[in-house]
Image: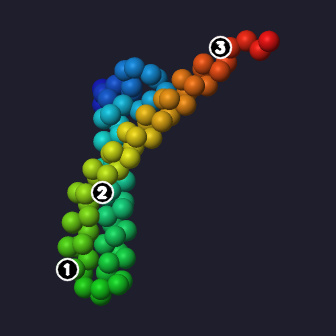
Amino acid sequence: MLFDQYLKKAFSSKGNPRTDSKFKSVAKAFSWRILGTFDTIIISYFITGELKMAFSIGSIEVFSKIVLYYVHERIWERFTIKKEVNELERTDTVAA
């Protein structure tokens, strides 16, 4: 129960309830990279036939793609907020 409340608080956005918190974006980036790195290692192994080379490739790309995903996620979040603001402005106007 306590852990559930901590996760709910950590993953909720303080400002807009429709946006993800930065912590949630970081958590999503890490979970996505674990899956993506596993995929990269498997593909690298099939291409090279060497397990050591596959793990080398996977270990290099994991760090760069965590950063890239976080930046990507925050950019998308910014566009989502602007779209919602524009939609609200359009509904406030009265048709003549």
Question: Are discs 2 and 1 less than 8 Å apart at CB?
Answer: no
Q: Is label 2 in a helix, a strand or a loop?
A: helix
From this viewpoint, is residue 1 visible?
A: no
Which of these two is toward me, 38 or 94?
A: 94
N-terminal of the pair, mark 3 or mark 2, is 2
Per the image, the residue denoted by label 1 is: 52
Q: How much space separates mark 3 and mark 1, taking CA atoms? A: 60 Å
x, y (%) of residue 8?
A: 37, 28
Task: Assess disc 1: are there few (<14), some (14-19) or many (≥20) residues with their C-alpha within 10 Å of its C-alpha.
Answer: few
Q: Which of marks 2 and 1 is in front?
A: 2
Which of these two is toward me, 56 or 79?
A: 79
Per the image, the residue denoted by label 3 is: 92
x 33%, y 45%: residue: 71
Residue 76 left/right relative to 24 = right
N-terminal of the pair, mark 3 or mark 1, is 1
Reply above or below: 32 against 1: below
Per the image, the residue denoted by label 2 is: 65
Question: Are discs 3 and 1 less than 8 Å apart at CB?
Answer: no
- Quarter assignment of residue 85: top right
What is the three-letter code of the residue carrying label 3?
A: Asp
x, y (%) of residue 17?
A: 46, 23
Task: Assess disc 3: are there few (<14), some (14-19) or many (≥20) residues with their C-alpha within 10 Å of its C-alpha.
Answer: few
Which residue is most to the front?
96
What is the three-letter code of the residue carrying label 1?
A: Lys
N-terminal of the pair, mark 2 or mark 1, is 1
- Quarter assignment of residue 60: bottom left
